[in-house]
Image (cartoon, grey):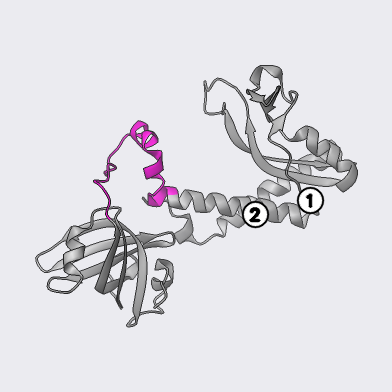
Amino acid sequence: MPYTAVDSILTGRFAGKKVSLRGWVYRKRESKDTMFLVIRDASGVIQCTVKRGSKAWKDAEKVTVESSLSLSGTVKADKRAPGGYEVSANKLEVVGLSEVFPIAKDKSETFLRDVRHLWLRSRKMNTIMKIRAEVLGFIHEFFKKEGFVEVSPPMFISSAVEGGSTLFGLKYFDDSMYLTQSAQLHLEVLIYSLEKVYCVAPSFRAEKSRTIRHLTEFWHVESEEAFSTLDDLMHLEEQLVSYVCQNSEEMPKRTRSLGA
């Protein structure tokens, strides 16, 4: 049986049907006769129940939070379950057991930065990354609609774009090079061929992080257009921001929820 994504199960069209799913244990609790496993995959979370005495019970007892597994069972509607549906599991296979997961409900921001690779598994970070992906998609959509050509300038540069004091230097074989501060100079060259160009790429600036506005690495949206005036540029920027904001607002509320 092929695996079904959690968000597809939560639509209700699999109610009363058997499904197989795979993911990670997001939450776990146990009553006298029932094990409740909240399973997450990239698309969402769903509650799965395992009854004492079933073939799946022994493996369900072993799993820990963030263990990976696959299971099969029957979908049923239950208003008490997250999303309104749950899977009554009759088969469970442990893919990988997790060690004790260090992130509990109340943790400081400093601690979460120290275990960033684990915090990325949270529902909050999952949603943030999905929204970021949608925003980037809207940016690309906008420039394509406006007739811009996407280009990919190099990340190594031989001279400063924004000022020599914020350059990150590095050894490049027998020469000295720098990490790019901006794609501006490359884009300006390309307008004489393509007229309207843009890129979405990282930039690097050796600025002391005195405020949140000083970042040593950030993703940069840049464009250049031949025959463009300052008014043309301001209008383009306003239209870009408006396009991204309006389309982001129309994203499904469930996708935009930042609940952890």
Q: Is residue 10 among what the camera can see?
A: yes
Return the x and y of residue 192 as percentages of the image width and height.
90, 42
Return the x and y of residue 34 as percentages of the image width and height.
15, 68
Of the two numbered discs 1 and 2 in the rendering, the one whose residue sits closer to the viewer: 1
116 relative position to 137: left or right: left
What is the quadrant of residue 175 in the picture? top right
Disc 2 is placed on an element classified as: helix
113 inside magenta stretch: yes
Q: Residue furthest bottom?
A: 16
Tell me what residue is drawn at x 20 percent, y 70 percent.
56
> What number of labels is visible?
2
Q: Is residue 56 above or below residue 259?
A: below
Q: From the image, tell me which residue sits under label 1.
A: 149
Near mark 2 (Cα within 10 A), the count class, few <14, some 14-19 or many ≥20, is many
Whether the residues at callouts 1 and 2 have beta carbons within 8 Å, the answer is no
Q: Which residues are magenta?
A: 97-125
Residue type at mark 1 is: Val
Residue type at mark 2 is: Phe
Disc 1 is placed on an element classified as: strand
What is the quadrant of residue 30 in the picture? bottom left
Residue toward you, 130 or 156 = 156
User: Which of the labelled discs sits on residue 138, or is there none?
Assistant: 2
- Alpha-carbon distance for marks 1 and 2? 15 Å
Tell me what residue is drawn at x 53 percent, y 23 percent.
209
